[in-house]
Image (spheres, grey):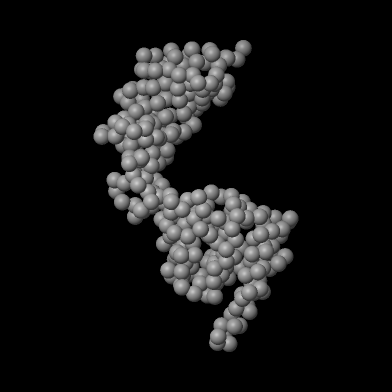
Amino acid sequence: MAVLDKVKLWGLKKSPWVYHVNTGACNNCDIEVLELLTPRFDVERLGVVLAASPRHADALMVTGVCTRQARSRLQEIYRQAAKPCLVVCLGACACTGGIFQDAWHFAGPVDEVIREVDPDARIVYIPGCPPKPEAMIAGIAKALHDL
Amino acid sequence: MAETVDEVIRHLEEVVGSAALKWERPRPNRVYFTVARDNARETGRRLVEDLGARFATATGTDIGEELEVIYHFECDAVGLVVNMRVRTPKGDPVMPSLTPVVPPAEWIEREINDLLGVVFEGHPDPRRLILADDWPQGVYPLRRDQRNDA
């Protein structure tokens, strides 16, 4: 790996800025993401900040089943995000499709949709319906540790 | 003294009159009646304007040979839910829109049109609401004869 890439990954570890993408969630994962920002969990103390634009983001936090309508938007958001960029599949629907696997609006699990754009994308899975806030923090901490 | 549920139901029967083809009351505070599709709009208007019911939502179902739309109205003072059934054959899935007289029905009618292909005549804005932009025309995902595992 080139030195510059190593520096970029090192930079990613310190204070990940997260852009939240809802590709068709029922909102339950989103409510749990909100918990992360409240004083009880307060992920900002760990350096995790919500970014307002994918261009400022180190990680995309994707919640919800990827619908046919959201598919191309998700790919476009991933293209806009500065690389290297983590993709966090948050919840059962984003990880696999969950109970919507055979549904008419399902357009593939988030990892496959992202890999169409970037086969080498770094993808993190945090399953659960919804995952507990502790699980989200643990998942992101593990992912950053493994960079 | 405030009205009781039974009094509201008597009032409802007067308001709907002979338009109702069949009455059901499966639970004390839930009433179903069926109307012919030609009477749907006028009956919906009377429920709101004469009975004072509030439009809650509508439900569309594929019941085999026909498509059924149930409009749910609520009488909040007594906790009564009034359900108006309207059926239309699949071969000619047309029924009058309630939106011109009951504006809150606008989006749910668009959604039922997307998912079941019920055409609401007189709807002021019958554009696609929730299907993806690239969804093919004329494919209705919640019809029972539609295979969705493709």
**Residue B100 visible in the current orientation:** no
**Residue A88 visible in the current orientation:** yes
Frontmost residue, B15 versus A121: A121
Question: Image point 42% across, 38% down: which residue?
Answer: B108
Tell me where residue A147 appears, x and y as whole percent.
61, 76
Which image quarter: residue B43?
A: top left
Tell me where residue B59 appears, x and y as whole percent.
43, 34
Residue B147 versus residue A60 in the image, above or below: above
Which image quarter: residue A42?
A: bottom right
Question: Image point 36% across, 22% down: which residue?
Answer: B35
Question: Image point 54% across, 68% down: which residue?
Answer: A123
Tell me where residue A29 appears, x and y as whole percent.
59, 53
Q: Residue furthest bottom?
A: A3
Tell me where residue A66 appears, x and y as whole percent.
47, 57
Residue A20 versus residue B119 in the image, above or below: below
Quadrant containing the N terminus of chain B in the rendered view:
top right
Residue A118 horizontal side relative to residue A123, left or right = left
Which image quarter: residue A9?
A: bottom right
Frontmost residue, B51 versus B130: B130
